[in-house]
Amino acid sequence: MVLAATSLASSALSSTCPVADEVLVERIRSGDRDAFTELYGRYFTRIFHFVARRMRNRADAEETVQEVFVNVFASIDSFRGEAPFGAWVFGLTRRTVAGRFKKRVPNLVPLGDDEVESGFHGIAREPNPHEAYEYSERLSRIEDAVVSDLSDEQRQLFELHHIEHRSIQEIAGLLSKSEDAVKSHLYRARKVLLAR
């Protein structure tokens, strides 16, 4: 009787206590998608606020947050547990935000012909043949993935957000979906395309 009461009390306690991040990480490593969904829910708001304070607009912030979670999923095996998981996630978030700022190259317009003569050719350059081939191959793989690996809904959401540059909020309104549903589908679509 005492054993049954103890078992009942411990099961009631475990249902009210959240699972530790490290336990969820181990479950993710073993292929548990629900564990990743739980971590996503646990950290989304904090990461979004962190990123939104650093980005210029909401669409950039939303895209960066999705990139953060793609990075978290892709590099989950590198988490060694030497620091709390939250610290690891925010370190990765900071690096992702910094990377987004590095990608932004200002559009430079030559001031005159003297810049070309002096050896200044701007930042943009034509890719060499090897780079051009790699770009075209990667683009081909991504296009194939869009057609073969994405559902019609994911393809539509991806095009609205990344091609037409519509915000998550706008897409949710257009398609009568929740913003979280749109974000979730975009996350899955990006995950498929990044694997290419």
Image: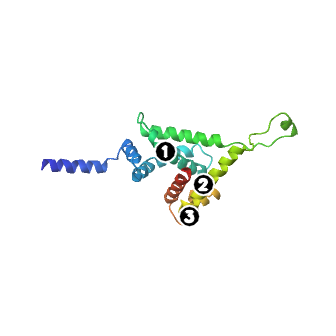
Check disc 1 and report the residue beneath it: 72
Q: Quadrant of residue 96?
A: top right
Q: Are marks 3 and 2 in contact (CB under 8 Å)?
A: no
- The location of residue 136, given as percent across then percent down, is 67, 51
Check disc 2 and report the residue beneath it: 142
Q: Is residue 123 above or below residue 60?
A: above
User: Of helix, strand and loop, which one carries label 3?
Assistant: helix
Q: Is residue 175 left or right of residue 106?
A: left
At label 1, which amino acid type do we have? Val
Of labels 1 and 2, the one closer to you:
2
Q: Nearer the viewer, residue 11 or 133?
A: 133
User: Of helix, strand and loop, which one carries label 2?
Assistant: helix
Of labels 3 and 2, the one closer to you:
2
Mark 2 Cα shell of 10 Å, populated few (<14), some (14-19), many (≥20): some
Q: Are marks 1 and 3 in contact (CB under 8 Å)?
A: no
At label 3, which amino acid type do we have? Gly
Residue 173: numbered disc: 3
